[in-house]
Amino acid sequence: MGVLDELRKEAEAAAAEKEQETTQRQQALARARAQLEPRMRELYKYFNEFKHHLEALGKEVQATYEIKDIGLVEELQQGQYGVSTDNPECIENFTFRCVCAKPGALQVHQRDAATVAVYRDYLRDSGLQAKVRDAGGGSAVFMVQPAIPVSVRFTADYERMAIRLRIRNLSTVGVSRHTLTMAKVNDKLLDELAKAFLRRPNRFDELVGATISNTGKLRLKKQVQAAMRKQQLEDERTLREKERTITGYVTRTLFGRKDD
């Protein structure tokens, strides 16, 4: 066998192997699409119905957020619900969104060029709008609109046979991403996600494996401290009642009896 024949056979074998891999990959993607597309359509329908019920009921939902360098912003009214997709005929991705807002503006003074740049990036990444006034010396005053865009985007991942979630500003300001198997994107997860949008206690972060933010940790710490303080007060009250009972008994014993 000549060198050319040897190289020709190697090239043919490599081409055949590549073609087989391509065929297998296409078959795997077709199987994934056949399973993921119906589930994505169900999810799309769920959030369209969720939007419809929220609007029909006119349900008032309030949210509280912590905005960097501003602090806690309370009594934000949630509304402007929407559901959108790139292709309604084939739901490969869709987004459920709303806005939490109230009138007015929140003022922040960043005192040098570096912090101004960092704050601009923070606002852009968070989807927050602000008017900026040059305050001289590289500093600037930001008039931040208290309007926080909230969204969750579902995307079918055929390669991984999974569903990707991109969550923006749901429980805290910021973006988180999660890749979940179809089995994990179940009715329980949707129920907890709906509770999160309704600002009710929920286990959504736990179900998607999200870590607790510093704000969440602080909130949890305060809740634990409040519970411990409540228990301490109850224990002290119980102890005082026991002391009064004992004191009363001793007093009656020593001074309540008549001499024989």
Image (spheres, rainbow, N blue to C red):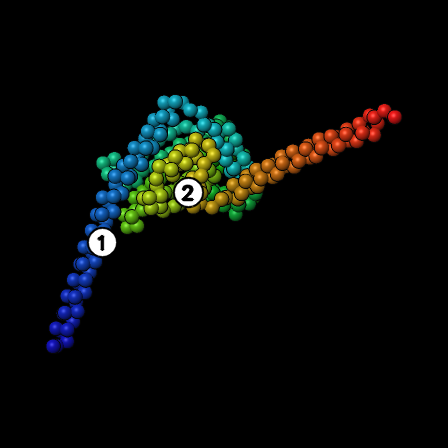
Q: Which residue, given by chain and number where applicable, does mark 1 sit on?
A: 25
- The part of the image, by quadrant, that contains residue 233 is top right
Front-most of residues 143 and 188: 188
Res. 165 visible in picture:
yes
Residue 120 lies left or right of residue 95; in this view the side is right
Of the two numbered discs 2 and 1 in the rendering, the one whose residue sits closer to the viewer: 2
Residue occupying the point 80% across, 27% down: 252
- What is the quadrant of the N terminus in the image? bottom left
- As drawn, the label of residue 207 is 2
Residue 39 percent across, percent down from the top left: 28, 39
Res. 134 visible in picture:
no
Front-most of residues 123 and 203: 203
Task: Identify the element where label 1 is drawn.
Answer: helix
Front-most of residues 229 and 106: 229
Residue occupying the point 50% across, 35% down: 65
Residue 209 percent across, percent down from the top left: 43, 46
Residue occupying the point 34% across, 32% down: 47
Residue 154 lies left or right of residue 222; in this view the side is left
Local packing at callout 1 (Cα closer than 10 Å; few below 14, some 14-19, many 20+) is few
Local packing at callout 2 (Cα closer than 10 Å; few below 14, some 14-19, many 20+) is some
Distance CA(mark 2)–CA(mark 1): 31 Å
User: In the rendered structure, which disc, 2 or 1, sits on the residue that comes first in sequence?
Assistant: 1
User: Please, what is the three-letter code of the amino acid marked with disc 1?
Assistant: Arg
User: Please, what is the three-letter code of the amino acid marked with disc 2?
Assistant: Leu
- As drawn, the label of residue 222 is none
Marks 1 and 2: in contact by CB < 8 Å? no
Residue occupying the point 88% across, 26% down: 260
Hey, which residue is sitting farthest front in the picture?
Answer: 260
- The part of the image, by quadrant, that contains residue 111 is top right
Residue 33 lies left or right of residue 174; in this view the side is left
Residue 238 percent across, percent down from the top left: 68, 33
Hey, which residue is sitting farthest top in the picture?
Answer: 57
